[in-house]
Image (spheres, rainbow, N blue to C red):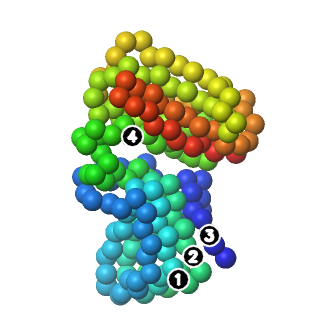
Amino acid sequence: MKMTLLSAALLLVTGGFAVAQEYPVRQEIARTMRAGAAIEERAVEQITARNEVEKGASVLYEAGRSVTLQPGFVAQAGSVFEASIAKVVSRTNSPETGALLVSAAPNPFADLTIVDYALPKAARVSRLLTDAQGRVLEQTQEEGVQAAGQYKVNVRGGNLPAGIYIYQIQTDNGSKSIRLIKQ
């Protein structure tokens, strides 16, 4: 049975922020984590694991969207295993490289999610929320130019039916979309 752990999942969810290292976008883990090992595995979006964590091993899996434990995954009694959903930024996709970054947490959400975006340089910004059919539900144009840096926007979904929505950040230099799941 496939078990997917998202931000509303059974295992620990953190608001951590891993930065300035090279992390893959997706990672598959099949190797055994041996007793005495202290291992941290991170991926920008997704980790899929079907490995064994032996007694005495300490293992952390952290990804931006999901950690999936597939058949064959075992964390033996006496091991320390933690899986978490947290923002993981790799040096190759950090704002310093000029890419607009967008994430949301919690996602899936019930009434409120916080969209976090990073501008690599100053730009005019507009935000757009659409449903899965592309109908515009909300559109916001910021006054003037926003400086480079991190921004947070509350997206209230209390009046939205359950479903999939697209939140788009548009700037002078391009745009980035993120899928939001309303429960």
Calculate the distance from the C-alpha at mark 3 to the C-alpha at mark 4: 28 Å
Q: Quadrant of the N terminus?
A: bottom right
Per the rendering, the mark at residue 101 is 4
Compute the Cα span from label 2 to label 4: 29 Å
Q: Residue at x 39, y 40 (%)?
A: 101
Q: Earlier in the sequence, mark 1 or mark 4?
A: 1
Mark 2 → mark 3, Cα distance in angstroms: 6 Å
Q: How many marks?
A: 4
Asked if labels 4 and 2 touch by Cβ distance under 8 angstroms, the answer is no
Of the residues under marks 3 and 1, which one precedes in the sequence?
A: 3
Q: Which residue position holds label 3?
A: 3
Q: Give the foreground label among 3 and 4.
A: 4
Q: Residue drawn at (64%, 26%), measured in percent from left and top? A: 136
- Type of residue at label 4? Leu
Q: Quadrant of the C terminus?
A: top right
- In the rendered view, does 181 fall on the left or right side of 77? right
Nearer to us of marks 1 and 4 is: 4
Mark 2 closeness class: few <14, some 14–19, many ≥20 residues within 10 Å: some
Residue in view at x 47 percent, y 22 percent: 126
Secondary structure beneath label 1? strand
**x and y percent of residue 155 in the render?**
57, 31
